């Protein structure tokens, strides 16, 4: 028994002192929009900063800000509108650290034969429109262009319905579903929601303010690793795409390459702006828009919503 305890004790001490990995929750499955985060892991930038990070794919029924606020994960990805709404609902500890997409890639997709030239024309047309009713962007568009004429039906993902109905339009990410549609031989037009004036930062790294204040060096190392990961991914995505393709067999290397090329312009706005940087004016505009459409009930101090590292 003494011999057994002598063998087990070092293992028990090691298990009790070894830190658990930091959990980073995505908001969907591995794909090009998360390339920089996976690059930080694959290329060793997290470990270089003294971090052990576990990347968790999305799909949880609980919103990522809520998971961070509840302490279920240390870091997560979200959008600027979700963060503002979380604050309005009492989760005032959520803070954004890094905004991957400077231009939000949310859009609408229609068949080219319809001849649409804008989001407004889609919303004033006949046919069917698949979108997630009640989302901040749909509230904004309804307020700006309503009444909405197409029959609204819920968007459940993919392009299955779109392929078989020439009168159907749908929401999309312009770096995702349009690529699938073109690969399927469809002729399409896409329109950015950002062009209508609603442009929240997206694929943002978030954490809790308690963590930001109690572990500032960890947070700084996390953002540094993510920024290096995104720069490396933009420079050469092939190795990281191979790693993500293994994690998500449903997506091909061809699709990953096409998505990577399409999204660069939405991520890197200029050579002299650091990747992921946010501005107070963008947040102030967003808060005013959310208040106007009723997505939040009161104005929010934007200084509480984000920190540039």
Image (cartoon, helix red, strand yellow):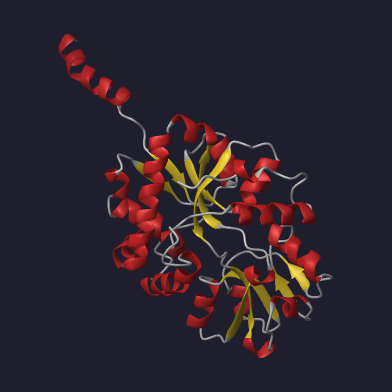
303 sits to left or right of 254: right
Rendered location of residue 86, percent (x, y): 65, 43
Q: In this rendering, is residue 71 above or below 248?
A: above
Residue found 38% across the figure and 36% down from its top = 217
Q: In this rendering, is residue 17 above or below 236?
A: above
Rendered location of residue 172, percent (x, y): 60, 69
Q: Is residue 237 visible?
A: no
Rendered location of residue 186, percent (x, y): 55, 85
Give the residue furthest to the left. 3
Rendered location of residue 158, percent (x, y): 56, 69
Give the residue furthest to the right. 147
User: In which quadrant is the N terminus drawn?
Assistant: top left
* Count of labels in the image: 0
Q: Is residue 3 visible?
A: yes
Residue found 48% across the figure and 81% down from its top = 183
Give the residue furthest to the top. 2
239 sits to left or right of 259: left
Nearest to the observer: residue 291 or residue 126: 291
Nearest to the observer: residue 112 or residue 159: 112
Residue found 46% across the figure and 74% down from its top = 262
34 sits to left or right of 107: left
């Amino acid at each position: 028994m003494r011999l057994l305890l002598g063998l087990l004790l070092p293992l028990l001490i090691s298990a009790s002192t070894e830190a658990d990995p930091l959990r980073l929750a995505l908001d969907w499955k591995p794909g090009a929009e998360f390339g920089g985060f996976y690059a930080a892991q694959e290329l060793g930038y997290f470990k270089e900063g003294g971090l052990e990070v576990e990347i968790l794919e999305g799909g949880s029924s609980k919103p990522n800000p809520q998971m961070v606020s509840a302490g279920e994960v240390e870091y997560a990805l979200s959008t600027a509108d979700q963060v503002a709404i979380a604050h309005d609902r009492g989760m005032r500890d959520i803070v954004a650290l890094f905004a991957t997409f400077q231009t939000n890639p949310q859009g609408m997709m229609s068949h080219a034969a319809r001849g649409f030239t804008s989001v407004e024309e889609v919303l004033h047309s006949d046919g069917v429109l698949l979108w997630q009713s009640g989302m901040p962007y749909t509230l904004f568009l309804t307020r700006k262009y309503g009444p909405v004429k197409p029959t609204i039906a819920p968007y459940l993902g993919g392009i299955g319905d779109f392929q078989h109905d020439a009168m159907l339009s749908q929401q999309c990410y312009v770096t995702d579903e349009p690529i699938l549609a073109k690969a399927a031989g469809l002729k399409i037009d896409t329109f950015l929601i950002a062009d209508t004036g609603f442009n929240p930062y997206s694929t943002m790294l978030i954490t809790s303010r308690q963590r930001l204040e109690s572990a500032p060096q960890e947070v700084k190392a996390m953002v540094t690793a993510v920024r290096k990961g995104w720069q490396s991914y933009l420079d050469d995505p092939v190795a990281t795409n191979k790693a993500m393709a293994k994690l998500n067999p449903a997506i091909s290397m061809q699709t990953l390459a096409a998505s990577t090329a399409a999204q660069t312009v939405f991520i890197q706005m200029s050579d002299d702006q650091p990747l992921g940087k946010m501005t107070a004016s963008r947040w102030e505009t967003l808060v005013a828009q959310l208040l106007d459409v009723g997505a939040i009930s009161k104005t929010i101090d934007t200084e509480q919503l984000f920190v540039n590292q």
